[in-house]
Amino acid sequence: MYKDFRSDTVTQATPAMRRAMMEAEVGDDILGEDPTVKKLENMAASLFQKEAALLTVSGTMANQIAIMTATRPGEEILLGEESHMYNLEVGGIAALSGVQARALKSSCGKFEAADVRKLIRKPGIQAPVSRMLCLENTYDLNRGYPLSPAYQAEMAAIARQYDMFVYLDGARIFNAALALQVKVSDLAQNIDALQFCLTKGLAAPFGSLLLGSREFIARARWIRQRIGGGMRQAGHMAAAGLVALETMTERLQQDHDNARRLAAGLCAIDERLTDMDLVLTNIVQIDFASVGKTAQFVTDALLTRGIKIKLIGETTCRMIAHAGVGPEDVDEAVQAIREIIR
Ligand SMILES: *Cc1c(COP(=O)(O)O)cnc(C)c1O
C-alpha cells in the first residue's frame, strides 16, 4: 500500500458510504422520482442558503454546465490564471459554451481590483460582452488559498457594476470555510451560482452539487440532460454524498493539522523547502531548489519507499493531506525526504 499524498481525490468511500449506497431508496431521477437525490439537493441548497441544487457527476461537469447556463457563444468570462476552469477542463469553455476566457493574474490567491476592472470589456460595436466573473475557493490547486467572504464580496461588487454573473468554483469550499472559521453559506453570499465537490476531502466516490436560483438550476438541469449528465437511479450516488455531508466536513481539520505538521517537518529540514505562511488548508507546495534536487529525483526516490507525491515543476512538488493519510504517514514522509535530500 502506497502512502499517497498526490491529491485528496484518492480518498475512498467510507464503510458508512458503502452501506448507504447499497441501501439507498432510489427512483428515476430524470423523471424527478429519486427521493435520495432530492434529499441531497435539498440538504445542499439549505446548507448554502441557495434556492435550488443540482447533482452532477463531477466538479468539471458542474462548472461547464454553469458556463453553458449563464453565457451565450461569443461572450467572455474572466477567471484566475491558476484556476481549474482555465487550466484543467480540456478547453470546455471554448468547446462546449463557445465563449472565450480572459485570465486574471493572481498574487497569493487574489486578483487586484484594478486588474479586474481593466479586463472587463466596455460596450462597443467590436467588443465581446464580459458576461461572467469566476472565483475559485480554495484557489489554486497547488496552494489551496482560502478567500474570505469580504474579498469575495469586493470582487462580486465590481462584477455587479457591469451586470456580470458571479460564479464560484467551490470544489474545496469546506476547506476554505474551516480555515476561515465561517459557514459555507457565508461564502455563498453575493454569489449567483457555485459548485462544490463531494469527492476530495469529503471522500465520496463521485458527485458535485451545483447551486443557484430556482430559475438558474432549472435551466442547468436541462443543459445537464443535453450533455448526457441526466442519471436514472442516481440515489445510489447521492446516498454517499449525504454521508459525506453528514460525517466528513468536520474531520477536514485533521487534514489542515496534518498539512501544518508536514510543513513544519519540512522546515525543520530546511526552511526554504516550503513557506509555512502559505499552508492555510490541506495543500503543501515544496521547492527542492534550495537543496539542489529536482522534483523528478525526489518523487522517484520517494516512490521506491512507497510514498507518492505530485510533481508540478522542475523543482516543485505538491503534497495534500486527506482522510487516507494520518500524522504517522506525514512523519514517515518527512523522514524519507530528509534522507533522500541529504
Ligand atoms: C477537483 C476540482 C474540480 C473538478 O472536479 P472533478 O470532480 O475532478 O471534475 C474543479 N475545480 C477545482 C478547483 C477542483 O479542485
Image (cartoon, rainbow, N blue to C red):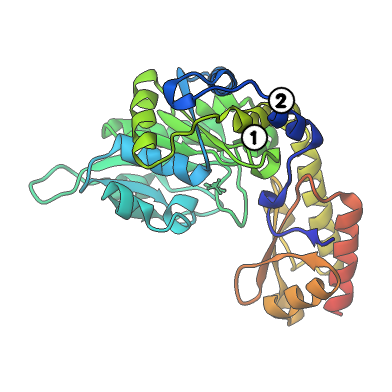
User: Which disc is residue 134 wearing?
Assistant: none
Identity of the residue drawn at 69% across and 46% down: 280
Relative side of 162 to 187, left or right: left
Q: Position of residue 107 (x, y in %)?
A: 51, 54
Relative side of 68 to 209, left or right: left
The kind of residue tagged 1 is Phe
The kind of residue tagged 2 is Glu
Q: Quadrant of the C terminus?
A: bottom right
Q: Is residue 158 visible?
A: no
Q: Locate residue 26: give its quadrant.
A: top right
Distance, label 2 to label 1, CA atoms, is 27 Å
Q: Is residue 305 above or below residue 116?
A: below
Residue of label 2 = 23
Identity of the residue drawn at 64% across and 20% down: 25
Q: Position of residue 116 (x, y in %)?
A: 35, 46
User: Which disc is residue 174 wearing?
Assistant: 1
**In the rendered picture of this protein, how many numbered marks are placed on residues?**
2
Do callouts 2 and 1 mark residues in contact (Cβ within 8 Å)?
Answer: no
